Each structure stands twice: as structure tokens, then as C-alpha cells.
């Protein structure tokens, strides 16, 4: 176990968190800051009073019209937008459980999550309604609500926005329009949630390719929310750029929950665009951006960056992937800020490690977060590793999830007990230095990190085997100058199709069936894949060969 001597002296070691719920933060901010802007959406300003009223109306509709019982699951399937925040708090207000879903998912991927969670309602962006409709078979979904991004844009355009964002689309058959839900006048049910009740089921993928839902309570999310606000010294009224995907725990913490807790302003970005990001920072005087390394690297690479006044930025921070040293330096040169790297997982409500603001280290996970016990242990013997010695990162703390939804065996495998404390096994290999700073060096689990998105090879392989010409497939990671790591498929075609199918054919087929971050960007054909005596594909041999090529 390691506690750094470089813990910021102005911060307490123990964090006092509210014994309330996530929804209570919205109620309190509405009372304190009712007329303040809660959401700034490309020039349309939505007050805390308006946000609160929208959540009440949605909660009433879910209770009276959809007939949801307490604890029922509701899936959110849209890009960052005002309706995402309204839906999130509205579902919680209805005593239901939020199931955030990656809007890049295809129908098969969405179906697995809907079926596993038992979601009864899907709230989606209208552009994604066809994906929802194609994913319903075998699920418990009874109601679909679709929303138009354009409904919350200003009457007169202030920003030059893409056509898909400003489009007014017809309500699909079988869907209830968001506007109709907002027009309701019935009262919401009595709020009955408590701090230790289930708040959300946030999905990650396991090494088997089966989605795993991480069960989080109000208490686990509040710990990270309050902790991040305290760590960064955010005052009330802080303006956050909502650039990280809100379905991810990191984007949710940095771009939604922290802002509402403080009575601050969220400035949602539905998709990344460096020019729009600079314009939004300038217009809204953004103070904080939870921005992945690929995004901030793209921002500071803009040759016209100096046209914009970004002087309001006080902090840039995020985790998920390592910030390249060259980009770290450019951020300092262009913005005058140190990039505060952090580390966490879906299972740990985003943050278990974070760099001290006054003394960050580059390409470093940071030190253990508030009330968090962090160790490096041998992955097989579970014996503690000495400083500098590589081992598996394990951690314990109030931000940990309760377990995987309806997967008791996977939950049991994810935890170990050391000296009477229950630790989560991250599956990541790293080490701690003699100053208590943690570093990640490898992965125990077979996972590809593409621009901060986790890609599990088994899941991609399963989909590739659906191609009529694919005999065998093995998915590995390959280096990429922009994404850090990207997906490569090593494919053996059926004998009669060899020479008839190109790599571009496989990539195009996969692009139509997988989320954008998952589909292979590189395809290599081989006559046969290496196998063990029992016929198991030796993926590690292919990965090691790819690593050697990348290092040569």
C-alpha cells in the first residue's frame, strides 16, 4: 500500500461527502442558482429552473405513462446534449436506474445491453432511432422516446453547426416525441431514492466480449464528484466544457455531475470539433475541460488557435489514455497549463489516482485519490511489489462499484481480500515509484485502448466471424500516431475466397456493423493463425510480433 508524501498540503486526507443523492444536488442548485445558466448549448442558455422542470416532467411521464416501478431501468442513447442531462436526472427523479449507452453502438451491440439490463424504456436521439428499432428483439423495452438536438438550439444560429445537429426530423413510428413528454402536466412520484440505492448500470466489456454492467450507487458517484471538485478547487459557478462522452463515467463526472453539484454551467459538445471547442471556450469563458489526450492534442495543433481567447481555462484534466510527452509540452506552451493526468475505470467511478495539481508528473497516473487504498501486487501470488517493480494495480475505496449486474461469478473474480480489505483487480500492470506516484506499463487483460475507448478483441472477433468469407480472425492492437493504439485484424479467409477479398472489403463490412472506435483500421491476411496443441489461437504471439514491428 502506498501513500504519497506529496499529497497537497491544502487538502484533507479524508473526504466528507453528502449523505444524500445525486438528484439532491440538482434540487439544491435550483434553489441556490435557479436563474443561472445550467446548460449552454451553442447560444441557447438553459437555467437551473428550466433543467429542474424538465426532469420533473420526464419523471412524471415515466411514472404515469410508461408505468415504471422503482428500480426499473431506462437506457440513454444519444450524444452529449441538453436532453442527455435532463433525461439523466429525470430518470433518477422517477426512482429508476440509468443505463447510459455509447451512441456509437450498432444494433447488435445495443441489443446486448438492453437485454442484459432489462431496460423498459429507451430515450434516444432521433438520428439513432433506427438503431434502437433494430435492437428491440429479445429485450424488455416497452417505450421509446426520441429527441431532436435542434429543439434546444437558439432560433438564430450563432455557430456554424453540422447538418445532422440542426436537422428537424419527423417522429419515428412507435416513438414518443420528447416535446410531447415535456408538454405533460402530471406530478412526478414521491422521490424515494437513498444514498445506497442503485443509481446507474454503466457498461464495460469483459474479455469474453459479453457486456458487463457496473452497478453504482449514489454514494459511489458522489465520492468522485465531490472529490474532483475539491481536488481541482472548483468554486461555485465553474463552467465546464462537456467534451467527454457523457455515457462514460469520466465524461459524466467532469461534464455533468461536478457542474450540477457546484451550480456551474455545462457546455455540451455532441461530437469533437476543435474549432467549435475553441469557440465555445471563448464564448462561455470555460474554466475546466475534461479532455482526452487525443482531443487536447488536436486542439493545440490547430494553426489558427491564437485567433481565440482561451484565457479563461484554469485546468485541463482527464484519464483513459496516456498523454504523449510532446503533446504535454505543447499544452504548456500554447495554453500555459499543465495537463493533470488521472486514472480510473468504469468500475471505480472514474477516479482512483490523480496527479497533484502543484506537482504533476508526465505520463503518470498520479497518486491515490481521497480515501483510496492502492497497491501493486504480483498478479498470481498477490504479494506486494517493491517500488519500481511491475505488478497488477489493485485498489479499494468508496467509489468502487457494487459488482457486475447479474454476474456474481464475474464479480467474485474481480475482487480479492488483502489484510481484511476488499480490493478491485484492475487488470492493469504498473508500478509505484518511491514518491508514491503510480505508472501503468502494460495490461494484464487483453484490451486495446483506442483514443481512450476500450476495445475488447473477443467482441470484435465474434463480429468478424459473421463475415461469410472469414475462416479465422484474431484481433490485436497496433500503434497509431493519432489514436495511440488502434485495432488490427489478422484474418484467414476461406480457401476459395483467398485473393478475392481485399483488406478494404473487410474494413468496410466491419464499419457498418461496429462502433466507430471498434472496427479494424488495419487488416492483415494470413493462410492460418498460430494455435496451441488444443487448437486455441495464440493471440499473444501475434501481439508480440506486432509489438516488435512497432519497435523496429
Image (cartoon, rainbow, N blue to C red):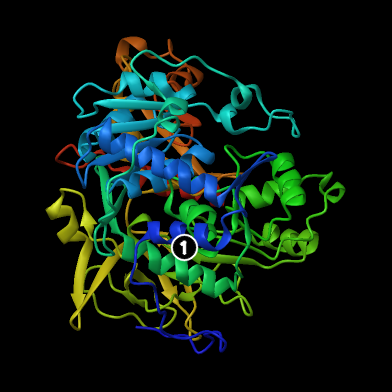
Residue at the image point whose x is 48% and y is 19% from the top: 508
Residue at the image point whose x is 56% and y is 61% from the top: 263
Front in this rendered view, residue 468 or 271: 271
Image location of residue 314, percent across then percent down: 70, 66
Number of numbered markers = 1
Residue at the image point whose x is 33% and y is 31% from the top: 122
Where is 38 relative to 527, above or below? below
Q: To which residue does mark 1 refer?
A: 28
Image location of residue 375, percent across then percent down: 34, 77
Where is 11 relative to 488, above or below? below
Q: Quadrant of residue 440?
A: bottom left
Q: Quadrant of residue 171?
A: top left
Image location of residue 221, percent across then percent down: 37, 62
- Is residue 435 found left or right of 294 in the rendered image? left
Q: Within 10 Å of the Cα at label 1, are there few (<14), some (14-19), or many (20+) other Cα atoms?
A: some
- Is residue 177 found left or right of 189 in the rendered image? right
Secondary structure, mark 1, is: helix
Front in this rendered view, residue 12 or 436: 12
Front in this rendered view, residue 316 or 40: 40
The residue at the far right in this view is: 307
Q: Is residue 218 visible?
A: yes
Specify the quadrant that holds the N terminus. bottom left
Image location of residue 293, percent across then percent down: 60, 53
Q: Quadrant of residue 329?
A: bottom right
Q: Is residue 493 visible?
A: no
Amino acid at each position: 500500500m502506498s501513500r504519497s508524501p506529496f499529497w497537497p498540503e491544502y487538502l484533507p486526507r479524508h473526504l466528507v461527502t453528502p449523505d444524500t443523492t445525486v438528484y439532491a444536488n440538482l434540487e439544491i442548485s435550483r434553489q441556490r442558482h435557479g436563474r443561472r445558466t445550467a446548460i449552454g448549448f451553442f447560444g441557447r442558455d438553459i437555467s437551473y429552473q428550466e433543467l429542474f422542470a424538465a426532469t420533473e416532467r420526464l419523471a412524471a411521464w415515466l411514472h404515469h405513462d410508461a408505468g415504471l416501478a422503482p428500480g426499473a431501468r431506462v437506457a440513454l442513447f444519444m450524444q452529449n446534449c441538453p436532453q442527455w442531462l435532463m433525461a439523466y436526472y429525470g430518470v433518477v427523479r422517477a426512482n429508476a436506474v440509468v443505463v447510459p449507452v455509447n451512441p456509437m453502438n450498432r444494433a447488435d451491440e445495443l441489443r446486448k445491453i438492453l437485454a442484459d439490463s432489462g431496460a423498459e424504456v429507451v430515450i434516444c436521439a432521433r438520428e439513432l432511432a433506427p438503431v434502437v428499432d433494430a435492437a428491440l428483439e429479445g429485450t424488455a423495452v416497452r417505450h421509446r422516446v426520441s429527441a431532436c438536438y435542434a429543439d434546444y438550439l437558439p432560433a438564430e444560429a450563432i455557430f456554424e453547426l453540422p447538418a445532422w445537429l440542426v436537422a428537424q426530423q419527423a417522429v419515428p413510428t412507435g416513438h414518443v416525441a420528447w416535446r410531447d413528454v415535456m408538454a405533460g402536466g402530471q406530478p412526478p412520484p414521491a422521490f424515494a431514492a437513498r444514498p445506497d440505492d442503485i443509481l446507474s448500470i454503466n457498461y464495460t466489456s469483459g474479455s469474453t466480449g459479453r457486456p458487463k454492467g457496473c452497478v453504482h450507487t449514489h454514494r459511489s458517484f458522489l465520492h468522485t464528484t465531490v472529490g474532483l471538485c475539491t481536488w481541482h478547487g472548483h468554486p461555485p459557478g465553474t463552467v465546464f466544457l462537456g467534451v467527454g462522452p457523457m455515457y462514460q463515467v469520466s465524461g459524466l463526472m467532469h461534464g455533468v455531475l461536478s457542474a450540477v453539484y457546484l451550480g456551474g454551467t455545462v457546455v455540451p459538445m455532441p461530437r469533437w470539433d476543435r474549432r467549435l471547442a475553441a469557440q465555445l471556450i471563448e464564448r462561455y469563458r470555460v474554466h475546466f475541460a475534461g479532455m482526452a489526450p487525443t482531443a487536447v492534442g488536436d486542439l493545440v495543433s490547430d494553426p489558427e488557435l491564437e485567433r481565440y481567447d482561451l484565457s479563461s481555462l484554469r485546468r485541463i484534466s482527464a484519464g483513459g489514455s496516456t498523454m504523449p510527452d510532446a503533446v504535454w509540452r505543447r499544452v504548456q506552451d500554447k495554453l500555459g497549463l499543465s495537463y493533470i493526468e488521472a486514472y480510473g475505470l468504469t468500475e471505480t467511478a472514474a477516479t482512483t489516482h490523480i496527479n497533484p495539481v502543484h506537482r504533476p508528473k508526465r505520463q503518470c497516473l498520479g497518486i491515490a485519490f481521497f480515501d483510496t487504498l492502492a497497491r501493486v501486487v504480483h498478479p498470481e501470488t498477490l504479494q506486494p511489489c517493491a517500488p519500481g517493480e511491475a505488478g497488477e494495480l489493485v485498489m479499494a475505496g468508496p467509489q468502487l462499484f457494487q459488482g457486475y449486474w447479474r454476474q456474481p461469478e464475474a464479480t467474485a473474480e474481480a475482487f480479492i481480500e488483502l489484510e481484511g480489505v476488499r480490493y478491485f483487480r484492475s487488470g492493469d500492470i504498473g508500478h509505484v515509484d518511491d514518491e508514491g506516484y503510480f505508472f501503468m506499463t502494460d495490461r494484464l487483460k487483453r484490451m486495446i485502448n483506442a483514443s481512450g475507448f476500450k476495445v475488447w478483441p473477443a467482441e470484435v472477433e465474434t463480429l468478424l466471424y459473421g463475415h461469410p468469407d472469414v475462416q479465422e480472425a484474431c484481433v490485436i492492437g497496433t500503434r497509431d500516431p493519432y489514436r495511440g493504439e488502434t485495432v488490427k485484424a489478422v484474418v484467414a479467409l476461406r480457401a476459395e475466397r483467398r485473393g478475392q477479398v481485399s483488406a478494404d472489403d473487410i474494413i468496410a463490412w466491419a464499419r457498418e456493423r461496429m462502433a466507430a472506435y471498434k472496427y479494424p483500421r488495419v487488416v492483415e491476411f494470413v493462410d492460418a493463425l498460430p494455435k496451441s496443441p488444443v487448437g486455441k489461437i495464440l493471440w499473444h504471439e501475434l501481439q508480440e510480433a506486432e509489438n516488435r514491428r512497432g519497435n523496429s
